[in-house]
Image (spheres, helix red, strand yellow):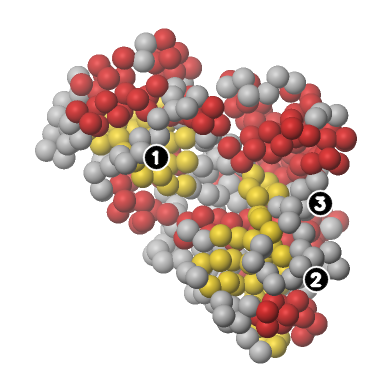
Amino acid sequence: MFARWAEDRLRKKLAKPFVHILFGARQTGKSTLIGSILPPDAVRIDLSDPGERARLLADPGEFVRFCRALPGGAAGTTVFVDEAQTVPSVFDSIQHLYDGDKRRWRFVLCGSSARRLRKSGANLLPGRSVIHHLYPLTTAEHPSKARRAGESPLPFPFDGRLGEDLFPPWGLEERLAFGSLPGIVCTNPEDRPDLLKSYAVAYLEEEIRREALVRDWGAFLRFLRLAASESGNILNYAAVSREAGVSIPTVKSYYQLLEDLFVGFRVDSYAKSPRKNLLSSPKFFLFDTGVRHAAAGLAPSIDTVRSNPGPVFEQWVGAELWKRAGYLGAKVHYLRTQDGAEVDFIVEYGGKLVPVEVKWTERPSPGDARHLKVFLAENRARTTRGFVVCRCTRPLELAENITAIPWETL
């Protein structure tokens, strides 16, 4: 069991007498993490098992009868339900049991899709549940070859202790090529491309077809390839609609589907800038660079990265900031004006704004900080420092209150 940044925080929260729901994409390590935290006598119900799922879909009351037959204990019996979204009626059953005697059972649920729950109007147990999220590996859990995890100069640091059991260290090109899913990080290098291709198509096809979310699989695959190719860019629904051969409402629903499966995320435009000519459409990112390559029809390889490293590096930094923001309750924005001024990312955390530029360079210069200078000047009340993430070997001061930092420090 490798260390996960969310472990300490999740362990403390699971000790509280609520129903706990952990969401995250497939293969982010949800079941492994929960299994390492729960007591040895916890009861697991795996709804990814077709037989188990079919039984509860056919007879929703069976879950209640099963739980009532479990032996009691002073601390209550812990029931762990994996892939809970596949049987939405389980949530109603858990509310019935929890309201009847919250001391007798402790419920922990995992899910890799919010789509079916929202579409079915599933009961997410308001007032009774705490929702958590797990993301692919961060640099704190999966350090670089040059350095182990250390203190980040960013003013929204991780607050957990990871110990020494970190995932195998990688260089920058490896993580840009293969991403940060735990199973990919730990597998043999020669198997990574095939596993990523399988994830990008087979997993999505299984998930989507099982829940009847898409009728025209061919149209969705065309869309997926376009969405992956355009990952990190400002959304243009009309252009994707024309190329994929589906309507704009369908394109919008497909993007929402990727978010509901936790394999994509939006970065909204920063709307509080004093500038008047801002672009307002969000950017869209696939959550993992390795999955992005495979979904775009590219080989997940270092050669693919070397052919055009800058945009992939920016996507990777965006995903790192998104993961950290998700754990810390922060928000990530971007800023771009019609006349070309831009800031790649703006992290809103603790009432402050932290602007971040991304540059594929080993030797950052003061010119790389020009957009950050303007942003700091226009947002003095909420912004005290900006950062340029690049490939420099040590932090460098580029201008007053603007520092270039090595990518490892993310």
Q: Position of residue 2 (x, y in %)?
A: 45, 52
Does 327 appear above or below 77? below
Mark 3 crowd level (few <14, some 14–19, many ≥20, 10 Å Cα): some
Identify the residue under disc 1.
Answer: 21
Residue at the left extreme of this rendering: 74
Q: Give the camera-side residue of 168 and 47.
A: 47
Residue 61 drawn at (x, y percent):
31, 14
Disc 1 or 3, which lies upstream in sequence? 1
Q: Secondary structure at mark 1?
A: strand
Q: Which residue is mark 3?
A: 304
N-terminal of the pair, mark 3 or mark 2, is: 3
Contact (Cβ within 8 Å) of mark 3 with mark 2: no
Say which element carries label 3.
helix
Separation (CA) of disc 1 from disc 2: 41 Å
Q: Residue at x 44, y 28 (%)?
A: 122
Using the numbered discs, state the Cα–Cα distance from disc 3 to disc 2 in whole angstroms: 29 Å
Q: Nearer the viewer, mark 3 or mark 2?
A: 2
Amino acid type, callout 1: Ile
Q: Amino acid at mark 2?
A: Ala
The residue carrying mark 2 is 341
Residue at the spot x=64%, y=38% of the render?
Answer: 256
Tell me how far mark 1 sits from mark 3, CA to CA.
37 Å
Q: Is residue 206 left or right of residue 12?
A: right
Q: Earlier in the sequence, mark 1 or mark 2?
A: 1
Do residues under tags 1 and 3 come within 8 Å of each other at their CB atoms? no
The answer to which quarter of the image holds residue 370 is bottom right
Rendered residue at 76%/42% (across/down)? 227
